[in-house]
């Protein structure tokens, strides 16, 4: 309670208050360091002695949408997603895309999966299509692929501090066409803050469009337009989580069936009289 009163504890990015109730998937930090308050692994976990089922979605984030679960922020991703029938638990994004970027973002209620996918040692591949203000030269592409020195903010001892270091070697190649002569394809295995924009800036290139098309083996398949979303398929679950689709215990099929049913207004139930 003293830590909460001192403002050192945050719940899902906001300062926690005494009496806040935790739900499956909530992210708790103390002095900026994440606290593993419940062992949420696989597709289910135990919280308060009860089994918890998790949900796994992907979404085509539109440019301008902010990857925050704080519904006080205009343009937050939960308002963009809207109500997901069959999902009652809190959803949150795995990682983030900045406001000016678009494309693939995963959402889940499974905190254990988030830890796994974002762990530095995992080196999950992230693929982007990037348009710059002028076409990159062959020398620019070679330099970007080999790694450039950039300065980003990194968490250290609970505080954001500048980090100046060379980026890891990555895939950078032309993805140009007559209509899009300044388009590049990036495949990264690290995720520093606004990394691609800073890399391009180091080569004198301004990014005017950044679109993520792949993350950890998942693509935008079944999300055919900006704002569209879909539950992850069994094959996609097999790619990103231990135990894969078998661990999901049929939950997503049940949710998809509920989503497919025609919506009907539920009659309001009268409270039962005590006696």
Image (spheres, rainbow, N blue to C red):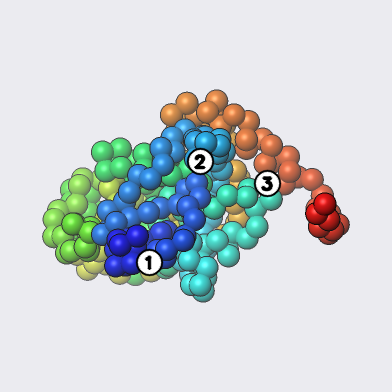
Q: Viewer-proximal residue, 95 or 137?
A: 95
- Give the mark nearer the N terminus: 1 vs 2: 1
Instruction: In the rendered view, tell whether residue 34 sits above or below residue 62.
Output: above
**Residue under the image location 51 percent in, 72 percent down:** 72
Decide which of tag 3 and tag 2 comes sooner along the chain.
2
| Residue identifier under label 1 | 15
What percent of the width, then of the height, locates residue 24? 50, 46
Q: Residue at x 47, y 60 (%)?
A: 20
- The mark closer to the camera, 1 or 2, is 2
Mark number displayed over residue 197: none
Q: Position of residue 76 (x, y in %)?
A: 51, 66
Q: Earlier in the sequence, mark 1 or mark 3?
A: 1
Residue closer to the observer: 250 or 97:
250
Tag 3–tag 2 contact (CB < 8 Å): no
Crowdedness near tag 2: few (<14), some (14–19) or many (≥20) residues, C-alpha within 10 Å: few
Callout 3 secondary element:
loop
- Residue 86's disc is 3
* Numbered disc in front, either 3 or 2: 2
- Crowding at mark 3 (Cα within 10 Å: few <14, some 14-19, many 20+): some
Residue at image mark 2: 48
Q: Is residue 11 in sight in this rendering?
A: yes
Mark 1–mark 3 Cα distance, whole angstroms, equals 29 Å
């Amino acid at each position: 309670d003293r830590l909460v009163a001192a403002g050192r504890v945050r719940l899902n990015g906001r300062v926690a208050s005494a009496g806040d109730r935790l739900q499956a998937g909530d992210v708790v930090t103390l002095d900026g360091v994440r606290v593993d308050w419940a062992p949420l692994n696989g597709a289910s976990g135990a919280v308060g002695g009860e089994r918890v089922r998790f949900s796994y979605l992907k979404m085509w984030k539109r440019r301008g949408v902010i990857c925050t679960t704080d519904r006080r922020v205009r343009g937050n991703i939960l308002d963009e997603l809207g109500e997901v029938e069959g999902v009652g638990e809190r959803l949150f994004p795995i990682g983030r895309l900045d406001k000016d970027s678009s494309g693939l973002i995963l959402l889940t209620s499974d905190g254990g999966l988030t830890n796994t996918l974002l762990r530095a040692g995992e080196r999950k591949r992230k693929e982007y299509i990037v348009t710059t203000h002028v076409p990159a030269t062959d020398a620019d592409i070679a330099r970007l692929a080999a790694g450039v020195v950039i300065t980003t903010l990194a968490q250290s001892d609970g505080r954001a501090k500048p980090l100046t270091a060379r980026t890891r070697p990555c895939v950078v190649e032309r993805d140009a066409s007559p209509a899009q002569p300044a388009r590049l394809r990036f495949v990264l295995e690290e995720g520093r803050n606004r990394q691609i924009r800073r890399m391009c800036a180091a080569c004198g290139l301004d990014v005017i469009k950044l679109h993520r098309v792949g993350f950890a083996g998942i693509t935008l398949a079944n999300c055919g337009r900006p704002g569209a979303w879909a539950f992850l398929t069994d094959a996609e679950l097999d790619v990103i989580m231990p135990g894969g689709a078998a661990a999901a215990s049929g939950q997503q099929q049940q949710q998809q069936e509920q989503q497919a049913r025609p919506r009907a207004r539920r009659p309001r139930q009268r409270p039962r009289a005590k006696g």
